[in-house]
Image (cartoon, helix red, strand yellow):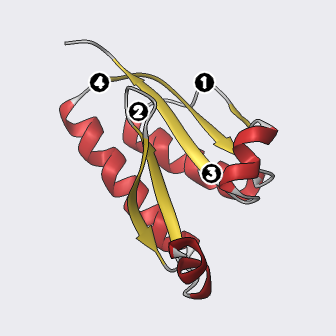
């Protein structure tokens, strides 16, 4: 029911994965540009207190938005992503066509 209401309102969720693999809705926006702003704001906070060892940008048949994320994250993390690629069909099926993800590994302190 919540998914149907979100769909009617055109809400775009931002899903975050915890270290144990559990997913949670981190934030939401009414459009992809709003999501991009929210995600980049969150990545800046992470980068301010940690050193990102490596990261990648994944997408579900959306290379244009993935490229935009790659350019922005390069500025935030100070290096290019290890790779930008189409996400697996299983994840794409659940996330939906057009989804973009940033996955990163932090250096241990």
Residue at screen point 30% across, 47% down: 44
Question: Which residue in the rendered view is the most extreme toward the front?
Answer: 1
Residue designated by label 3: 100
Percent position of residue 84, x then y: 69, 35
Residue designated by label 1: 82
- What is the number of callouts on the image? 4
Between discs 1 and 4, the one toward the N terminus? 4
Residue at screen point 57% across, 31% down: 81
Mark 3 and mark 2: Cα distance apart in space: 20 Å
Residue designated by label 4: 51
Asked if labels 4 and 1 touch by Cβ distance under 8 angstroms, the answer is no
> Which quarter of the picture shows residue 91?
top right
Is 106 on the left-hand or right-hand side of 83? Answer: left
Between discs 4 and 3, the one toward the N terminus? 4
Label 1, residues with CA under 10 Å away: few <14, some 14-19, many ≥20: few
Seen from the viewer's position, the closer of residues 27 and 106 is 27
Seen from the viewer's position, the closer of residues 44 and 19 is 19
Between discs 1 and 3, the one toward the N terminus? 1
Seen from the viewer's position, the closer of residues 22 and 107 is 22
- Judged from the image, the secondary structure of the residue bearing numbered disc 2 is loop
Label 2, residues with CA under 10 Å away: few <14, some 14-19, many ≥20: few
């Amino acid at each position: 029911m919540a998914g149907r209401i979100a769909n009617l309102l055109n809400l775009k969720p931002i899903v975050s994965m915890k270290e144990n693999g559990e997913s949670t809705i981190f934030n939401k926006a009414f459009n992809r540009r709003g999501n991009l702003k929210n995600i980049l704001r969150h990545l800046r906070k992470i980068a301010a207190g940690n050193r990102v060892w490596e990261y990648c940008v994944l997408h579900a048949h959306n290379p244009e938005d993935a490229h935009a994320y790659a350019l922005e994250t390069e500025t935030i993390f100070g290096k290019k992503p290890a790779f930008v690629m189409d996400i697996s069909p299983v994840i794409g099926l659940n996330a939906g066509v057009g989804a973009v993800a940033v996955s990163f590994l932090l250096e241990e302190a």
